[in-house]
Image: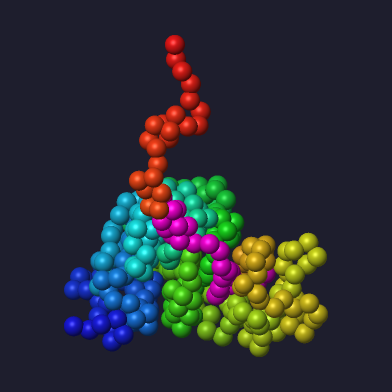
């Protein structure tokens, strides 16, 4: 029997047939995760993957760990219960843009603001894949689908902006075809104590092919803006483009040789800088940020709950039930 320190990628593969459509980006994410997990040195029985509903939700079947294929949008709620009662476990949530941002929207934002100690991987393909191609909360304006034959009228969510707005303590973005970059992000998320949110651009070749082709196929860094802590934010084939912050806090593109080029600080205490970076897009700035937007420390929900339980346990047997029942707002009915 192999132990946590001796595990390999093969140890994390199950005997289940992996069943996604040919060319689906989920295959690359699964392979990257299976290759990465041995780095953590955590026993498989101490690792749990929890998913909701959707194509991404099949993930627990293919990871040779504990797992649960739960209910639509509620994976963060179920994971909260597990993480807070079993602090010895490494808990991962796998979800999609529809599962997490539509029916699961409230569960997602509250888990992030509470800073529960688990990792949320959101596979974003801007479409409902499992139910055959309806528009999702991240589909662009005007998106023609089976459920929006004349084009979507809904303004799309920006998952990174949403997570930063909920004051998540770790927020990052990765790309399914960029194994190296994705592994770096996953490694940092695993090391983070608290809620870690990772959006992964994931291609759906059947219902929304090439949604992110401008950045997925970008091998020369023409469109990818790599966020590296402590380094100037530059990109382009020859690193000729850059970002800088305006006086009002928003961010603009500039030439790398100009004054005021922004140096990335993922540990900035306030979320404003990370939020401003989340508004940088291919359409508005000619580039797409990839990497860690925010990585800060804040009290963890699990620890705070444990402290309350310990305090309650210390008082156990010393209380007066009658006094408790008659405390607070009580009144006599005559």
Comparing 325 with 292, the one in front is 325
Task: Answer with the quarter of the image where residue 128 lies.
Answer: bottom left
User: How is the model colour-coded?
Assistant: rainbow
The x, y position of residue 266, in whole percent, is: 61, 73
Q: Is residue 37 magenta?
A: no
The x, y position of residue 49, in whole percent, is: 32, 65
Task: Answer with the quarter of the image where residue 69 lies.
Answer: bottom left
The x, y position of residue 165, in whole percent, is: 59, 56
Relative placement, left or right, of 18 versus 193 is left
At x 58% / y 82%, what residue is drawn?
Answer: 221
Q: In this picture, which residue range is highlighted in magenta?
A: 283-312
At x 53% / y 80%, what residue is drawn?
Answer: 218
At x 60% / y 80%, what residue is drawn?
Answer: 228
Q: Residue furthest top?
A: 334
Relative placement, left or right, of 123 versus 43 is right
> Is residue 309 in view?
no
Q: Is residue 294 magenta?
A: yes
The x, y position of residue 230, in whole percent, is: 65, 81
Task: Answer with the quarter of the image where residue 59 lies.
Answer: bottom left
In the picture shown, does residue 37 fall above or below 132?
below
At x 58% / y 69%, what residue is drawn?
Answer: 296
Comparing 213 with 243, the one in front is 243
């Amino acid at each position: 029997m192999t132990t946590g320190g001796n595990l390999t990628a093969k140890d994390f593969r199950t005997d289940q047939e992996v069943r996604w459509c040919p060319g689906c980006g989920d295959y690359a994410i699964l392979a990257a995760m299976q290759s990465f997990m041995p780095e953590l040195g955590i026993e498989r029985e101490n690792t749990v993957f929890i998913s909701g509903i959707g194509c991404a939700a099949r993930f627990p079947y293919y990871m040779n760990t504990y797992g649960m294929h739960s209910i639509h949008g509620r994976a963060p709620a179920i994971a909260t219960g597990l993480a807070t009662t079993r602090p010895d476990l490494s808990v991962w949530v796998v979800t999609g843009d529809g599962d997490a941002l539509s029916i699961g929207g409230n569960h997602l934002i509250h888990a992030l603001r509470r800073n529960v100690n688990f990792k949320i991987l959101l596979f974003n393909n801007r479409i409902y894949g499992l139910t055959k191609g309806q528009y999702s909360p991240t589909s662009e304006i005007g998106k023609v689908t089976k459920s929006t034959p004349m084009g979507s009228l809904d303004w799309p969510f920006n998952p990174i902006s949403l997570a930063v707005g909920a004051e998540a303590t770790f927020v990052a973005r990765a790309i399914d075809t960029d194994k190296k970059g994705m592994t770096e992000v996953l490694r940092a998320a695993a090391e983070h104590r608290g809620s870690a949110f990772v959006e992964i651009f994931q291609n759906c070749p059947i219902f929304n092919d090439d949604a992110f082709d401008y950045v997925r196929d970008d091998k020369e860094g023409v469109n990818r803006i790599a966020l590296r802590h402590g380094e100037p934010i530059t990109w382009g084939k020859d690193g000729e483009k850059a970002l800088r912050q305006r006086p009002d806090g928003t961010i603009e593109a500039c030439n790398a040789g100009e004054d005021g080029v922004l140096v990335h600080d993922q540990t900035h205490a306030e979320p404003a800088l990370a939020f401003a970076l989340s508004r940088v897009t291919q359409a508005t700035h000619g580039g797409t940020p990839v990497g860690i937007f925010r990585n800060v420390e804040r009290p963890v929900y699990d620890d705070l709950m444990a402290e309350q339980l310990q305090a309650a346990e210390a008082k156990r047997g010393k209380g007066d039930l009658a006094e408790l029942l008659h405390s607070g707002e009580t009144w006599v009915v005559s």
